[in-house]
Structures are given as structure tokens and as C-alpha cells.
Image (spheres, rainbow, N blue to C red):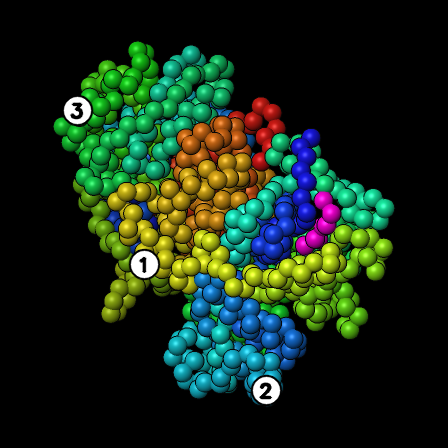
Amino acid sequence: MRKLAVDVVVIGGGSTGAGVVRDVAMRGYSTVLLERADLGQGTTGRFHGLLHSGGRYVVSDPLSATECAQENAILSRIQAGAVEMTGGYFVTGPDDDPAFADKFLAGAAATGVPAQEIPVAEALRNEPRLNRGIKRAIEVLDGTVDGWQLVWGAANSAQHYGAQILTYHKVTKIDTVDGHVAAVHCTDLKNGEDVLIETGFVLNCAGPWAGQIAAMAGAHPVDVIPGRGIMVAMSHRLVNRVVNRCIYPADGDILVPVHTVSIIGTTDVKVDDPDHLVIETKEVQQMFDAGEVLVPGFRKARALHAWAGARPLIKDNRVAASDTRHMSRGMAVIDHTTRDGLDGMLTIGGGKLTTYRLMAEHIVDAMCDKLGEKRVCRTAEEDMPIEGAGPNYVVTHRLHDREHDRLDDQIICECELMSRKMFTDALAEQPKGSFDDLRRQLRLGMGPCQGGFCSMRATGIALASEHIDIERATELLRLFLKNRWIGLWPILHGEQLRQTALDNWIFSGTLDIEHLPAAESEVVL
Amino acid sequence: MSRVVVIGSGLAGLVAANRLADGGAEVLLLSKGIGGLQLGQGTVDVLGYAPQRVTNPIKAVAEVAASHPYAAIGAQGVLTALGYLKELAPDLLVGDPEANYHLPTAVGALRPTCLAQPSMLAGNLKAGSSVVVVGLRRLKDFQPELIAGNLARTELPDGGRVSARAINVDAVAREGEIDSSGLTFAKAFDDPGYRQRFAELLAPKLSDGEIVALPAVIGLMDRQAHADLSAKLGHPVFEIPLPPPSVAGLRLNQALNARAQAAGVRMVSGVRTVGFTADGDRVLSVRNATVPAEREYRADAFVLATGGFEAGALAMDSYGAVTETLFGLPLVGTENTPLIHGDYWGAEQPIFSVGVAVDAQMRVLDKGRPVYANLRAVGDLIAGSTRWAEKSGDGVAAASAVLAADSILKEL
């Protein structure tokens, strides 16, 4: 058994946990972050990529709107490389109530969200695929953000301040002594080793899983209600700005251009288990219909991939328990001292990716109060070490990079312009990682071919790097293809079905991949 | 002379066009592109898995289920087609219809196939062989460590194992280029001087008795390239086909195209065929989407060799409706719901068995009766099996094409 001792244990490697561990470390505490999978593998990696301007909430949730507007400005500065300043429109569809736009503009003024109505003709000129029947258009400062880059940026920053980031470490038990948190037990899933971490404070940032963590410390049940939302990525950018329906928040009301795709979202259905999120056919159909309203011909565009994420909403008695969309998106910090008589633990829920830094500030402030210490939050002032100092992301960045190294390096994934060196560097940093772990940082296999051409190359290169053996390499390839399929089959039609047939001709027809020998003993991936 | 239009220039279309021209028909081959052969591995698969590994493909063909395309084609149909293919490409296809080869793939699996190119045959390995898999550093589609690693842990179909190791050489196909395609390498290997330099680079790295595995890029036009390189190295050499664009597939494509042109087949390429006219139970013409006006081609008989989903001949829309995209032909297999399921490594996806039903002359059927008396469907369009999984695409394509052509010739 490995043993560690730190001031603060942060549980959960999504955006909240990463923001929290950075803040804790910057305030001078020794700290470790525990994540049972990879960073950003839960809700953080399963959203639509929107960096809110606040516009979405100006009518339904004014406090969130103001927070979004402020955090949008901060993040696009301190994590510039993860954020694209696309701008956004709120448009009134042909059958939408045009009066909502007046409420919207009033709400924007009241909440400090920059917004300005523009002529419909101007909106159509700038976004020629938009429905010609839109009745009003309001311009806002929406952006897009890569959730994985955001989380890794915060985690890297935390490491600069001495934090330890332990991925694939699953929390198994939380010890308390005389009503105070004393230690966290976890298991290193990559090698089965138990790890004991002595600590005085636990910050529970497990999102949809926060209830499970709180229960391990003996707290009364925390009602986190996972709200499942599905997203569908469409090939190419159908729009270059974020396009929102100018209506009260509803299903399928947003189309977000992120990297080389555009993502339509989303639905909201209460679920019991955030580990088993189903992508229902009828919800996919609902997204396609919603897409038609924004961009006519949407159903004939190429759908690439779908996924589902679970919102970590804390139960709020203002609305019915089945309606998760209208629960508070505002963050809630649960103080287990007053609630459960348990010292040394706080749980945070709610919130949204755009306000992840502010959520961290709140919970770490609350911890400092409990500890009776005055340590000031500096996370809004300091740029992240890697991507913070440079310019904002633009979709042509990789093309620019490849123009420079195309004579010295190979392109392993043509769809996403991932070079060999990008892959081998990431692998060297995460030698035990799966190809999906690497994908989240590199976008390996996320383009139109969905791994058809790059995954065999990546497998061979990983093997040649000698970080892994042949059995592991082969099992990683099998797992990668299996995981790609999870997001493919629910949306499969049209050009992507055609691509799948070609991919099958390659993998099965030419490579006969399904007849490779099985591993002699189980390979832990 | 009677006129026949063949639509599609994959294996099925090229075989049909050759066969019809050989039989005296005036043949027009319409294709929107280069055809599917360059996507494949340049071998002729008849039946590789049923679902266990097949050693005698002709015997296995005779035992397929009634819904399988081979049930209408029959073992004799396959034998005739294999014989014809060997005539069409005598220096490119060899093999025994009653014994599959088991050839290493670019991930190191042993893939069963019936006819193969002579440059691949040393890959039909015997127990105890030593293989050295040679990667070219500038060719990313051939990863020698992956191939050698999996070959070494594979039991041969007859039992026994081989040993395998991987090496890499830094051969330059085009000066200053680090990311060269297989085609670029193939053109370089067409040059005997390049082969000589390559042999000098590689030979010192080989051990006595080793069989040399190389990516299938050893020449595109020069049919002697493989034998020459093998002689220069003093080792048996075999080629392993790559994912598209496949040089081995291109060789077959070129051979069959050249043969068709020599036989008098007229070709119109680069234009999509988008419509047709019919009168009662006969197709009168098809239309190409030429600019500025569509072009109509009339004929006495039509062969539809447009392929499957990969070619766009079959398509599913966003509501899940499946269609044959040119004639709107009735499809079978759509009743198997769900057509797509979530288990990637599980049972075959039913969608990919959807296609048209045909009779023994390859006429397309609707409830047992031909839709058009002079329209035949060949190749991937025919319903009833997942070709890539069972490794049967080439056999179905070639045999259905020969049957369709022969039945047309009988009528004309």
C-alpha cells in the first residue's frame, strides 16, 4: 500500500475538480486530485462545447447569466488556447414567439450580458445556412471551449503549484475520526495497488457521482439528480458562430461550431445512474428535427457521432423533481458540518462548465472559512502555463502547424491533422493511457473516418514506442473501435453509414482484425 | 450487334463488361469513378469464414444457406468465374479453388483467400518459418512491429507457429518527403535501379533463411518487380496489402481495365448515372448527369454493378429508410430489425446484408418475379451476406457477373 499525506484531497477530475485543485494549490495547500478514470471523461467531456455568453440564462436564471458573462471574459483570457471566440446569435425561428426577444434584450441589459439586436439580413449574410425564415437575431459573445483542454490546462497549472493529479484512482472509502475526515482510501486501477491518503479536508467535486462520494463519508444522502443530455456532432461547420434559438431554454435549441464539427444539443431527461446513459433513437430524431429549424437541410448533412452527458444538478424544491432543465444551474456548496455533523468535507454541485473557475473559488473560500484562514483566490488573474499566454484558438491552428512540420513529420490522423510527434509525445506522458485517453487530448479518430485510417497506424506506433506490448496494443485497438461504435451506431445513416461500410471493408475485409488471437491473460486497459 | 450497358467499374462491373465483350456484345461501361478494386487487397476471396475458417472454398460455397448469394450462383458458377478471372489476369492471379491461402494482413492476422497475386504467395507460411517484417519509415500504413507481434502469437491453420521480427529501413520514395503514400513507393519500385539500391540497404539486415515481408508497394506497372527484388535479396519475399489506396488492388484494376479496352469495351468515366427510363418490364435507357444536359444511353440489356453501401448504391436516410439509389429496386433484409445494433464485436449488423434478391440469371426480383426482364444486378448489391466478414466479396462479384453476362449473351 502506498501512503500519502496532504492538506486537501479533491475528488473528481472533471472541470470542477480540476478548477478546485488548481485554486487549492495556488493558495498554498498541499493537495491531490483523485479521478477514477481519465480527466474530463465524465460530464466535462460530454457537453456541446459552448462557452456561455450568459445569453441562455438572461430570462430563466439571471444570476447564472451574470456569472457566465464575467467568467466568459476571464476564461477566454487565462485559457486562451482552449477558447475560440466565435461569437453567437440568438435567433427567433419561423414558429417562435418574437416577443421573447424583447424579454431577452431586457434580461441581457439587467444582467450585464452584452447583447445587441442586428438586422435579420445581416445574420443571414454572416451565416448563409441559417433558416431564411428567422424573424429576429441578437448578437452575443458566445464562444466555444474544448472541455478536455480546459481541464488539462487547469490540472497542469495545479501541478506547477505542487498538486498531484492521480487519474485512474478510484475512491473506495473515506475514514472519519471523531466526526472529522481523516483519510481517503483509493485503488490505483492500472495496477491494483491500494493508496491511503491522510488528510484534513475533502472537497467532493464528483459531479453526478457526488452523492456516492458523500455517502462514503457517512453523510446523509445528497440528492444529485443526473440530467441526461444528448449531443450530435455534424461533420464540418454548418455555422461559424454559436446559434441559439431565442426561446425559453428547451431541447435542441443550440448549434455550436467546435473544432472541425458542429454540435447540436441537447435534451434533458432525469436518469438514475450516470454510469449508464442511453442515446435514445427518439432523442436523436428530436435533434435532427431541431437542426432543421436552425439550418434547413440538416437531416441531409453528415452526422458523425453522438454522446450523452449527465448534468450534476442538485435538487432544488422550486421545480418538480422530473424537470431537471429548470433546476438551479447555480452552484450549491453543501456544508456537511451543519447538515451531517461531519467536519472536513464540502460537496459542490450544480453549476456549469463556463463557471467552473468561479465554482472553485466559492468552494475553496468556504473551506478557508472553515479552517479559519484568510487565503486569497488568484485564479482569475493568472494565465494557465501552457495555453494561457497565447492567442485564442482558431480552427486553422493545426493546419498552420502542419504547414511548418509537414516535411519532418507524418500526419497520422488526416481528419484531425494529428502528427506522429503529437501522438508519441502524449503517449510518453500517459504510457498507461488508452487510445481514448489520448484521443481526448489529440482528437485522434474524431473526424469523418472515425478511426478508419488512423487507428491501425496509432496502434503500430504505440507498440513501436515500447511503452506497451503486442497484447496490450491489440486490445487497445479493439477497445478503441468498440468505443467509437458507442457513439456511432445511434446516429448512423447517410454518408456516415457509407463511411462505416468502407471502414468495415478495411478492418474486416482487408485486415481481418476480428481474427487476431485473443490475449493469453486479461489485459488491464 | 446488341448493346449492353454496365454501370459500375468494380470487380463485378469489369468482369461483366469483359465477359459480354468476349461474347460479342457491344458494351458500354459507365462509372462515376475509379471503381472499388483500389479499396480492396487485390486478391480474390471466395469464402474465408463460414463462420469457421474455410480451407476448401468451393466445398464451403456448396453448403451455404438458401438466403446467401452463393445459393443462386452455385459452386459451378464460382468455378467458371475463377477460371475466367485467371484468363483475364493470367500473370496476376493464381490459386486453387479448392484450397484457400492464409496470408498475413497489415495487422498480422492470417487472412484466408482463394486467388492471390504471385508476389503474396510466400506469405502462405509453414510452421517453423522465420519471417522478418520490414517497415518503411516513411510509409505509415505498414506498422511492422504490429504485424510481427501478432504473427508470432498466431497458431497457423494447420497447427504450429512461425517466428517473426520487425525491422525498419529508411528508404526514400520521393526526395524530401517523409509522409509518402504506398502509390509513391510503388512507382519508385517500378525502377530496377531503385530496387537495386533498396536491396543493398536491406540485405545486410537479413538473417539466413528468413522470409521477407514487405508492404504491397513493390511496383505498380512492372510485373517482374517482385521476382527481381527477391532475386536481388536472395530471400523469399512476400507482399502484404495495405488499406486504401491499395497498390495490389490498383494492379488488378489496371489489368482488368486494360483487358476490357482491348476487348472493345467503351468506357465513360467520371459521371454519375442518375436516372433511367423503362417501358413495362424493360429498361430502355439510363441517364448520366453530364453538364449542361443529361446524357441518355439506350441499350438492350443493363447490368447494375454499382456496389453496396460503401459505394452509395444503397443508402439509408436519417429516418432509417433504405433505398437502392438508381432504380429504386425492391430490397430484402430490411425486415431484420434493428438493422443496426450497439455490439461492435458482436453479430453482423443486419443493415449490411440488405440488398436486392436475384434469380439464377441475376435478374432482380420482386416477390419472386423479375422487376425488369433486361436488368441484372451483380456484386455487392445482392442481398444475403456480409462480404467483408466472411471474405466472399470477390467471389460473389465475379461469379454473379459471369452468370449475368452469359444469360444476356444467350438472349441477344
Q: Would you say B106 lies left or right of A62 here?
A: left
Q: Nearer the viewer, residue B122 or B399?
A: B122
Chain part drawn in magenta = A199-205
| Disc 2 element | helix
Q: Chain of mark 3?
A: B
Quadrant position of residue B149: top left
Q: Main secondary structure of the magenta part?
A: strand
User: Looking at the image, which residue is at 47% across and 19% down?
Assistant: B156
Q: Which mark is residue B196?
A: 3
User: Looking at the image, which residue is at 41% across and 80% down?
Assistant: A124
Q: Would you say A269 lies left or right of A439 here?
A: right
Estimate the x, y position of residue B235 in percent, counting from the top left: 27, 16
Q: Would you say A318 lies left or right of A377 here?
A: right
Estimate the x, y position of residue B94 in percent, counting from the top left: 31, 25
Total marks drawn? 3
Packing grade of label 1 (10 A; few <14, some 14-19, many >=20) is some
